[in-house]
Image: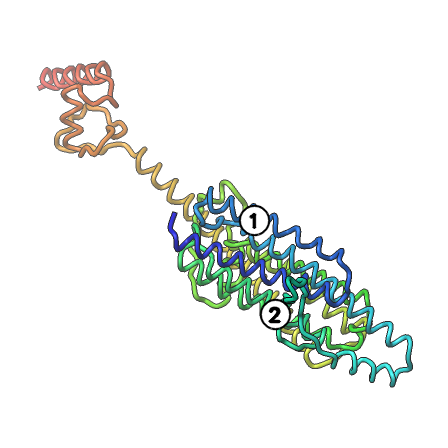
Amino acid sequence: MGSFTVARAIIVRLLFACHGLVSIWLLYQVTQEPRFWYLAASFGFLLVETTVTLVRKQGKEWKWFCPSVLIYLTMTVPAIWFLELHELEKRIDHRQSTSFNLSNMSLIEIHNETFDLSAHLGSVLGVKFEIRLPINLSPDEWIRTLEQLLLLLLILGRWMLPKGKLTHDQLSQLLLVYIGTAADIVEFFEAFKEDEVRFNKILCICILGLWSLSLIQFTLVLTAASARRDQSGLVTRHYNVKQGKHGCCAADVYGILISILLQDLPFLVLRILLIFKFNVLSYTNMFFTSKNTLVILLLLYRLVVVFLERRSEGRQQKYNNLKSKSDHSRPVMSSKYNGPGIPRSKPCSGNVTTGEKANLVQRDVCSDVPPSLYKLNQDKTLSREKNLDSRF
């Protein structure tokens, strides 16, 4: 077990734990409800996962799935959910309790209120112990900061984690895919700036649900790496037709389908709903709707190309197999060593030339021609020669 590999695995999990702790801490300070500290139970699962990874995998990550990322998401995503819903309730309450103009003023006052994170640990011998983060932000800014740090740590953590069975090429492609995916998710939160969304609880829950669904991509490794890297033209895919016997799709096909179902298609459906149902015709919403539509069309085009390439390679493989079988079953042509009575049979096993085969057959060594059959043909040849001599 390499000490550098173990150090990287531990450091990344410590970063995950610190960000999860800050998220839960912020949730407690905003709501002042101790029950939310139960979210810290995920730290126990993270400790178990770290122990298993270090002991069984020697610090290396799993090939297809990253359990540490999943546990990290279970710590931070629920905390962000509760923070968003808490701020939504505050906006709705202030809007209902005052008139429209006053509500705008109250909302400005709410979001201008800044605070820092602090926790009092008690005092010993008159000395007070306190933990404080000297960062003054509004509640909305704290939430956006946590959401963006979540995506940043997912990319940075995947880079720092031991690559396991991933090659350096696959890891670099995976990081590029993560950056593109994170950019799309950050753009998706631009919908919260629309007034039709800020005060609509159903839309806020839908946006948070689709955001949580899109984060599942970061727990998948090879399928995510194969999802969008073909769009950039960085890698040329070579398909192994033999894999088709054990499954209907390759890894890149699964990756493209996962990208469509978990991110692009849900994002597009929600943006279209905002346009036609809630009449949200802002520039950003129209632009990102067009962008999601174009991405889905490109992914579908890539699926068609992959299917056609696999089918053409399958046909070529079948043709090569039939051609090789016909070459093996082709009879041995006669040569100067073959007498007229020597049967033309299948080639002997091994690299044997035609002349060598003839010698082997004449010596009754070749196993492809039975000796009795050769003797019978030889007798027929001798009798024909005697008949010819008798005529002359």
User: Label 1 belongs to which residue?
Assistant: 47
Q: x and y percent of residue 282 in the render? A: 73, 80
Can you tell which of label 1 and label 2 is closer to the viewer?
1
Q: For the point 63% across and 76% down, which residue is it?
A: 135
Q: Looking at the image, which is closer to me, 94 or 370?
A: 94
In this rendering, would 264 be left or right of 88? left
Q: Residue at x 39, y 47 (%)?
A: 1
Q: 63 or 107: which is nearer to us? A: 107
The residue lying at 71 percent from left, 53 percent from top is 38
Closer to the camera, 98 or 312? 98
Secondary structure beneath dot 2 equals helix
Amino acid type at mark 1: Leu
For mark 2, does the 10 Å Cα neighbourhood hold few (<14), some (14 to 19), or many (20 or more) residues?
some
Residue 314, image x, y percentages:
46, 47
Q: Dividing the picture into quarters, in which one does residue 354 lie?
A: top left
Q: Disc 1 vs disc 2: Cβ atoms closer than 8 Å?
A: no
Of pointers 1 and 2, the one earlier in the residue sequence: 1
Q: Which of 15 and 204 is in front in this view?
A: 15
Residue 113, image x, y percentages: 74, 79
Locate residue 208, reporting x and y percent: 72, 63
Eyeballing the image, is 99 above or below 357?
A: below
List the residue tagged with mark 2.
Answer: 148
**Res 247 seen here:** yes
Q: Which amino acid does label 2 sit on?
A: Gln
Residue 289 shows up from this direction? no
Q: Tag 1: Cα neighbours inside 10 Å, few (<14), some, or many (≥20)?
A: some
Is 285 left or right of 360, judged from the image as shown?
Answer: right
Q: Which quadrant of the figure has residue 144?
A: bottom right
The structure residue drawn at horizontal position 12% and vertical position 32%, both measured from the top left corner, is 336
**Image quadrant in which the C terminus is located:** top left
